[in-house]
Amino acid sequence: MRRHLHVRTVPGRGESTPTTAEPIFGVNMSFYGPDDAMLTRPATRALFRSWGVPIVRVPLRDRFKTNGAPVSDDQLLSAMQAVRDIGATPMLIIRGLGSGRTADDVEKTDLHLLDLIHQVFGDGTAYLEFGNEPDLPGTDVPAADYTAAWNTVVPALKKHYPNAEYRYVGPASWRVDHDYVNYIGAFVAGAMPEPDFLSWHEYVCGTAGDSGWKQTCEGHLANWQTHVTDVEMTVQGKIGKQLPYFITEWNADSSAAGPVYTAGNADYLASWTTKAIDRLRGLRPAPAGAMIYTATDHGGFGLVTGTGQVTAQGRAFHQAMTGSSTVTRPKAEPPSQPATPIPGTEPPSGTQSGTDPSSGQDSSSGTDSPPASPPAGTPSPAIL
């Protein structure tokens, strides 16, 4: 059952966006390169703005490609300013453990990232997710190490901007079924300070070579409530209370090569998306937010193509967001510009928005993720 509809006002502009269904269904920005359509295309930002997207999750990447040049501060600022231009609240993935980084390395990097975040958002609300999928096979950061790094870095970040409305989120688990829920349990038992929000990811298919993949994709939606309940019971058992949570990535299959994302299955994916959003709305307790993976520019994923076309999944998402089957198509320019120009938004020569140059790439260290579809499940596409 849908709850009451809300009208949001974009901060600092005094403009109301279209009436939207519950403002928890945000999006992920792929940010696999400087040519990401959300950065380079004002019309794409205007489209998401017209949908009233309330929250955008952004990986503050170290490198775009394995052994490539570091992502510049201007590029990071561009990504964050794009979120502000949309009028959304940012969920920003800051650096966590992995790829040989120590807690001291992470603290130094995250203090610098925090300065960039403050440059764009000031003391306003921002959700800061400490790393991404530390429990992913191939990354394998033990819960004790993740927690120890949290206990070192997060207090330093809180002290750096004590008046900011920044909320700290973790551990961004790649899954919470079976024994994976114990990672969250171990984290909350030792985390000091306590996380403002927990976070994890939900993909249901994992269907490489499975002829019955449609049944798997639909049948596993029912597991989402089981996962929420298991997390709540685990956390309650560890600290005697429950904590609010985000599902910071969700979609059908975490592999962009999954059959669900092929053109011939576009209508099925749209139908699945409607069912998934209904399932998310029914979760109890409800998530503080649920960000679909992804907005643009990652192979078969994407609500909008790099050239600005809304996909079948994008239409289903928009309809659920606004209660309308008609997609708003904005003019070529957004209704207003950000307070400061977005630097470096022109694609470099020879690149084309909408390509997927680094699918599965570790978004923090530049290393590759494990294979996209291990038998027990699939890693998420945006590993930090």
Image: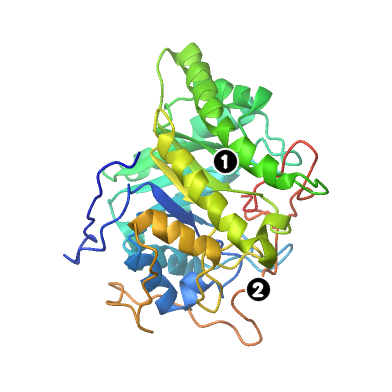
Does dot 1 land on a helix, a strand or a loop? Answer: strand
Q: Position of residue 350 (x, y in %)?
A: 66, 86
For label 2, the crowd category at 10 Å Cα-Cα, with few meaning under 14, some 14 to 19 and many 20 or more, is some
**Residue 173, quarter of the rendered image:** top right
Q: Position of residue 131 (x, y in %)?
A: 56, 44
Residue topped by disc 1 = 201
Query: In this rendering, would 20 be left or right of 103?
Result: left
Residue at 54 percent across and 21 percent down: it is 230
Q: Which colour scheme appears in the figure?
A: rainbow
Q: Residue furthest right?
A: 209
What whole-number distance in Å separates the C-alpha atoms at marks 1 and 2? 24 Å
Q: Are marks 1 and 2 in contact (CB under 8 Å)?
A: no
Front-most of residues 17 and 352: 17
User: Does the rendering let one see residue 174?
Assistant: no
Residue at 61 percent across and 65 percent down: it is 32
Residue 353 position (above or below residue 6)? below
User: Does the rendering let one see residue 196?
Assistant: yes
For label 1, the crowd category at 10 Å Cα-Cα, with few meaning under 14, some 14 to 19 and many 20 or more, is many
Q: Residue furthest left?
A: 14
Q: Position of residue 200 (x, y in %)?
A: 54, 37
**Residue 85, quarter of the rendered image:** bottom left
**Residue 44, quarter of the rendered image:** bottom left
Residue at 51 percent across and 45 percent down: it is 275
Query: In this rendering, would 2 be left or right of 291?
Result: left
Residue 293 position (above or below residue 296)? above
Residue topped by disc 2 = 355
Residue 153 position (above or below residue 357)? above
Amino acid type, residue under disc 1 in the picture: His
